[in-house]
Amino acid sequence: MTQNESTASGIGHPTSRPSLFGRAISRALDIQATWRERAHSRAILASFDDRLLEDIGCTRADVRRECHKPFWIG
């Protein structure tokens, strides 16, 4: 394989793999998305009425406990 062929295909090219910085940024964005999803899900849970809570097997105490968790706690 010639030098031109290897760089054209990305093989052996330094940018063909994500850098440590790129992986860190990607991980940080994944974590942020998870935190947003938790906060959103808890807000929806808090809006449920007693009938809906009964349907999913939760009590108001369960909802209070879940909704008072910080967004970074799963």
Image (tube, rainbow, N blue to C red):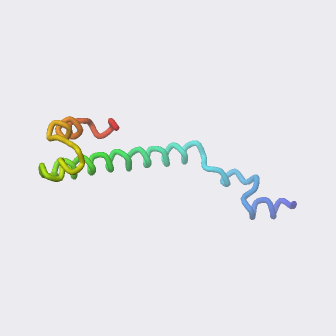
x, y (%) of residue 66? 23, 38
Place residue 62 in its image quadrant: top left
Place residue 58 in its image quadrant: top left
Q: Is residue 7 above or below residue 53?
A: below
User: Quadrant location of the C terminus?
Assistant: top left
x, y (%) of residue 6? 79, 59
The reply, left or right, for residue 52 in relation to residue 21 is left
* Residue at the (21%, 49%) spot, across then down: 45
Outermost residue on the right side: it is 1
Between residues 52 and 18, which one lies in front from this camera angle?
52
Between residues 35 and 42, which one lies in front from this camera angle?
42
Place residue 72 in its image quadrant: top left
Outermost residue on the left side: it is 50
User: Quadrant location of the N terminus?
Assistant: bottom right
* Residue at the (60%, 46%) spot, across then down: 19
* Residue at the (27%, 50%) spot, across then down: 41
x, y (%) of residue 51? 14, 52
The reply, left or right, for residue 52 in relation to residue 32 is left
Between residues 14 and 60, which one lies in front from this camera angle?
60
* Residue at the (81%, 64%) spot, across then down: 5
